[in-house]
Image (cartoon, coloured by chain):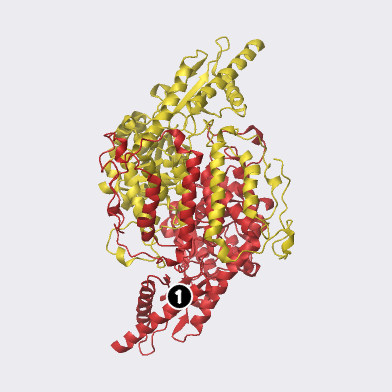
Chain colours: A yellow, B red
Amino acid sequence: MAPPSHSYTNNGASQNSVVVLPVQTGTVSPLDSHQLLDPEELRRQGYQVIDFIADYYGRMGDYPVHPSVNPGFLRGHLPADAPSRPEHDAFGAALQDVRDLILPGLTHWQSPHHFAHFPASSSTVGVLGEALTAGINVVPFTWAASPAATELEMVVVDWLAKALHLPDSLMFCGGGGGTLLGTTCEAILCALVAARDRKLADIGSRRIGDLVVYCSDQTHFAFRKAAHIAGIHRDNCREIPTCRDDMFALSPAELHAAMQADVDTGLVPLFLCATVGTTQTTAVDPIRELCTVAAAHGAWVHVDAAYAGSALVCPEFRHVIDGAEAVDSFSMNAHKWLLANNDCCALWVKKPSLLVAALGTEQEYILKDVAAEGHDVVDYKDWSVTLTRRFRALKLWLVLRCYGVEGLRTHIRAHVRMAALFESMVKDDVRFELTATRQFALVCFRLRSPQKLGGEKVANELNRRLLEEVNATGSGPYMSSAKVGGIYMLRCAVGSTLTEERHVREAWKVAQDRAASLLREMESTY
Amino acid sequence: MAPPSHSYTNNGASQNSVVVLPVQTGTVSPLDSHQLLDPEELRRQGYQVIDFIADYYGRMGDYPVHPSVNPGFLRGHLPADAPSRPEHDAFGAALQDVRDLILPGLTHWQSPHHFAHFPASSSTVGVLGEALTAGINVVPFTWAASPAATELEMVVVDWLAKALHLPDSLMFCGGGGGTLLGTTCEAILCALVAARDRKLADIGSRRIGDLVVYCSDQTHFAFRKAAHIAGIHRDNCREIPTCRDDMFALSPAELHAAMQADVDTGLVPLFLCATVGTTQTTAVDPIRELCTVAAAHGAWVHVDAAYAGSALVCPEFRHVIDGAEAVDSFSMNAHKWLLANNDCCALWVKKPSLLVAALGTEQEYILKDVAAEGHDVVDYKDWSVTLTRRFRALKLWLVLRCYGVEGLRTHIRAHVRMAALFESMVKDDVRFELTATRQFALVCFRLRSPQKLGGEKVANELNRRLLEEVNATGSGPYMSSAKVGGIYMLRCAVGSTLTEERHVREAWKVAQDRAASLLREMESTY
């Protein structure tokens, strides 16, 4: 944080007053348009950026995952206004600031010590796929607006669906289809609006206030957010409680009871969001049984596999979506654990026509392609919230092609194996306990409260302090917490591309050491 | 389109059966995780990608803007499944396919001959900002999840707001605040949900069906889409007709009448979406007067300046948002005309607390930062539809810093000047007429129907054919059309970073030549 506050050339002066500064002050003239995309400059500065990124990954293990900074720390280092004119070698100076000011203030999601959140996994091909996409910079909102981009998206969502062992009914080749969006919340929102419109067409469009949506108390907030955005009344979102004995999975019997109770009071079950791999403990809702219950009430079933969807690339995990043939829609984030860099959320639906009916647009200025007339082309603007969109298919296609399905399996299995190792070390230490069954690469655990100091409250406080101390080591691991069924637990999510076994062992050693000192302190206090 | 269909190594075999192929077939083993982010490989392949992008821009003028391809053309060239294992030098082979298969099938938005859509403007710094963002790959959904990313976003939206001469009330430094989203539709949706919730808190949450939203018949479909997603009844979207005499601007008197009529029938005016620079003709709605009308009915005013917002960097355009002090929210796409590459939509609101009330979340697993406690930090997940988000601020900060506000003005003015040139050439040719007043860098024009063949229908058909023929030249310009007030017109939007005066002159020459031959044909027919 050493560099002083920048002043640039305008010293915060209003942009209204054009101050023409002589060249010798170190400023340069405003660029003319030839310079904005000059191939040689792009090459020169591009190499700098590639080197910057490569150096960043090379040194990643040296960064503390989470910075020690206070709110407002960056603002003080930056001028209040954009510069009027660029300083000399502005790009080089800016890169230097990224290195000196910005990197030290980031949480390094790519650090091998990052165990806190589900990963935002990065790979060489993912990074470069994004770079290439940005360079090509097309906007494939209709087929005609960039045919190859739309077609590659259609091909690659089928590739991915097959690689993940999804049912044919969700693929273009099976009558369904998929698209690439930014995030799960968008995906759920699109599915929900399609479901809502279908239902309102049946029961009358004025009955939006009677529609009810269902999830468990473990479902990600993204669902409640999507439902709220879509105009579902806040009172009509049923969060069905789960319990530890059921491994925090949504109970079909409870869902049935909730839907029946709503029907009995004149409400209309609309939508179930089931989760495969919940955020807090990676619980898996039983899809087959839930679909049966939902079908009896004409409710749409969406599966949110944001995190665990990537694991489906391994046949040994296929069982977690048994019964998926019956779902109406399915989404997963390839940017989470499948090396596709942020952002890349895949959404598949069984009946694309319902998405188009809900989200479709027709406007005169949109160019139709003569070649496309009479053909069943996809205009992806009608499949999502957004009209403008990025060419995300290119990145995902490169990742699948360059790593191959087997490569992705190897990647997933390595993390699962490391998580199993961490789990076994927890099990072997009697001071600790596992607080949820490990299903993928997340381990939930806690320090047991010494017997003489019973009560969940004490245990929770103990573990809250343990997390704080583990995360305070700076050079060590960064974990997070969950509170489920009244139990506060630590979450260790293995998922960073750079994480190796040694990082997992180190993380465990830090947890053990901090626990030992906390326990000593407790014993001396009481 | 020469290369034959790929087969990769699995020949479309199911991914369930793991076929282990010997190395000598040209396949390589699945990667271990060390190889996924190896700095030296990243450097080597990264340089290839940079060279690829630089070469693409170097040759951009040689590509036909729009490809001659038929639906399904790409599918036949790609295998039905992702490869099981990568082929030898998969990355190099994939880049070759991008060159040979994908580029020829794209609509080249960066071509200097691209005049069809509002630009998706690219710049060296925009491209490399995206690359750097993808390399750093953090997910700044909360302050704690990457403090510097959140803080840079807060700084850069204020920088941009000042550069665009927006009112202080929309800036953090003036009590408001901004965020960077993907698209305008997202921005409008966020503002609309905030407005909806505020209004429903007043009138009762069950009255969603009584809410009415307003726009003109020129407003982009994104608004109607957003309103529909947010649960506003389709019957409650008033599209107020505009007319050519008013330059297709929304009439405050008409808005007042529409709102009053709704109030008289017990409905509740909720939201006005005003546009500065409509898609079809770049019409500018009179913000000050519209705000006065909306205020009388307690309606939220959003300004959509998706395209023309970039022009506000020039003081000479400030007048188009006179009265903006009264608006509740404002959005523009820096990825359209401000060199920030797709995607980068800035949304500002006067009262961020209303966004957070509508879109906010609290969940236990979200790490709180001790340093942030008690401080008024922004968690941007509560400002948007999405929770996961990209570090877009880095790119926009680099663009502002490296080009400077003066550089951006030079860029905008060059396009405005070229559009004025095109306009003057249309004016000078008696066979043509301008069909809307040029305000920024879009020229709307048409070929007059020869006097002996009167009637709008004939004129429209003539211009429809003219567009078809202009766009069919392949190596020439690519334009689009609009139909406004019953008049079919051609749209020539100057905005590609690479467009120079000679491209504009060429485009006009093509239009003249095609027109001459069409007119000759007409005269010989009748």
| Residue sticking out furthest to the top | A452
In the image, taking residue B268 as reference, residue A172 lies left or right, namely left
Q: Residue at x 63, y 14 (%)?
A: A522
Q: Inspect the image, locate mark 1, and give the three-letter code of the amino acid beneath it.
A: Ala
Taking depth in this image into account, of A35 and A491 the one nearest to the observer is A35
Please name the residue that numbered disc 1 is placed on: B507
Res A175 visible: no
Q: Residues within 10 Å of mark 1 (few under 14, many from 20)?
A: many
Taking depth in this image into account, of B471 and B46 the one nearest to the observer is B46
| Residue sticking out furthest to the front | B24
| Residue sticking out furthest to the bottom | B452
Residue A108: x percent and y percent?
56, 37
Residue A491: x percent and y percent?
50, 27
Q: Residue at x 73, y 53 (%)?
A: A7
Residue A15: x percent and y percent?
69, 62
Residue A122: x percent and y percent?
48, 40
Relative height, residue A322 to residue A380 (above, below): above
Residue A333 in which image quadrant: top left
